[in-house]
Image: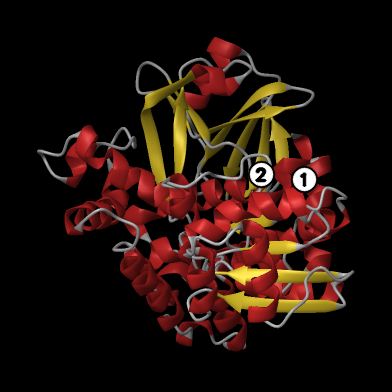
Amino acid sequence: MKRKIYEDLMNWKEDNSFKPLIVLGVRQCGKTYIIDEFCKNEFKSYKKINLLYDTDVIKLYTSNDPSEKKYNALKMLIDFDFDQENSVLFIDEIQECEELISELKFFNEKHSNVRIICAGSLLGVKLARFKKSFPVGKINILNMYPMDFEEFMIAFNQQPLLDKIRECFQKDEPMGVLHKIAIDYYKKYLLSGGMPESIKALIDCQEDYYNYDLSKLDNIIEGYKNDMSHHVTNSNETLKIRNIYSSLPSQLQNVSKKFQYSVINTEAKSREYALPLHWLVESEMVQICKCVKLPEIPLLGFVDNEVFKVYYSDVGVFNRLVNNNAKTILLDDMKIYKGIITENYVANQLAAKEIDLLYWKGKRDAEVDFLITTANDGVIPIEVKAEEHTQSKSLKIYDELYHPNYMIRISSKDFGFANNIKSVPLYAVFCIDSIL
């Protein structure tokens, strides 16, 4: 499957600084697959090692030998001379050896001709709790996300439809008869989410979507649950991580939508759950959307760190966790979950574009779902609606207070522009990066 991060990997290859690269991302988002494809396609010589199995490498780097001696021993141990021209070494599951992560500084400083890519499960958690000397400034880091809707459509060979969506986004022209086709693809995306294995299972259905194999998502969720016992201090922390994760539908359903520790249990305190929540964020199983007190540039300068929302990092996982199946989703019968699932989907699409997740909350229960900063028009509010019904008191209040150049409403309606509101269909969220 085509992944847009491939272009970023190419940029890294062409960068003369030759810094080792670390790719971060939630489990099962496709890191190993795309790195493997990139290395095979773009280098003459390629070697992959996995520290879950190549434990002798861990023994080597936990020894007291000097860095240069370890470096030379590594080449013999894995039978690969990564000093040779046009070669690359891929170290998977590098989180298993903190000492080797620290040694990346030595690679960059003393052997800067070497190309090394690193990835791993829960690598973000490991880096956040790093105890050794971290190679600051000596490595490059890329973030990878589940496949966004654009990548999903490419997997279904729908590039012409994507081109039409982008054109209509730019011109504020309706899609017409193509609108329903695009909405149907959006519903299918809600079913599978963005995990490559899940999308492949959907493609393999050959349009028999009611028999879509949900076990792919079940396996991903089970893997997440197993991960929640790794890189934690004790079983009590594991329990807190799982309790936070399972509380998110209730968190998003409450009136304020903001994350409240009391929803986990009535006696929960922030000081007890701050680290478990941080674990979930660093694992990239969840995404944080921060509240902005005043929607002015720079938005991050006006964040209220005590008020935030938490979304699942993949809408397909979300639907599976609340037992929404193919019939429920494709027939648009998600009932009480429809609104928050739609909002979660939009958050995922924005995050995949590396757009900061921010929202505004004012008086009289006024709340705008997302805020973005554009190059030409300053701060633009984004409102999300699951239905075609688009009446909103909050957007009107925001308009009266801050007079934005225009506003965006994401809904199931077709493209258009009226009353200073740019109407963007749910399937076109990926286009928003073009106005940043």
Residue 32, quarter of the rendered image: bottom right
Which dot marks residue 169?
1
Q: Is residue 76 left or right of residue 325?
A: right
> Measured from the top left, where is residue 429 in percent x and y?
65, 48
Q: Is residue 117 left or right of residue 279?
A: right
Q: Nearer the viewer, residue 181 or 109?
A: 109
Question: In the displayed structure, would residue 167 be above or below residue 384?
Answer: below
Q: Assess disc 2: are there few (<14), some (14-19) or many (≥20) residues with their C-alpha within 10 Å of its C-alpha.
A: many
> Measured from the top left, where is residue 355 in percent x and y?
63, 39
Question: In the displayed structure, would residue 395 be above or below residue 427?
Answer: above
For the residue marked with disc 2, what is the amino acid?
Answer: Val
Q: Secondary structure at mark 2?
A: strand
Which dot marks residue 424?
2
Q: Assess disc 1: are there few (<14), some (14-19) or many (≥20) residues with their C-alpha within 10 Å of its C-alpha.
A: many
Residue 304 at least partly seen: yes
Seen as rendered, the residue at the extreme left is 267
Pointer 2 with pointer 1, Cβ within 8 A: yes
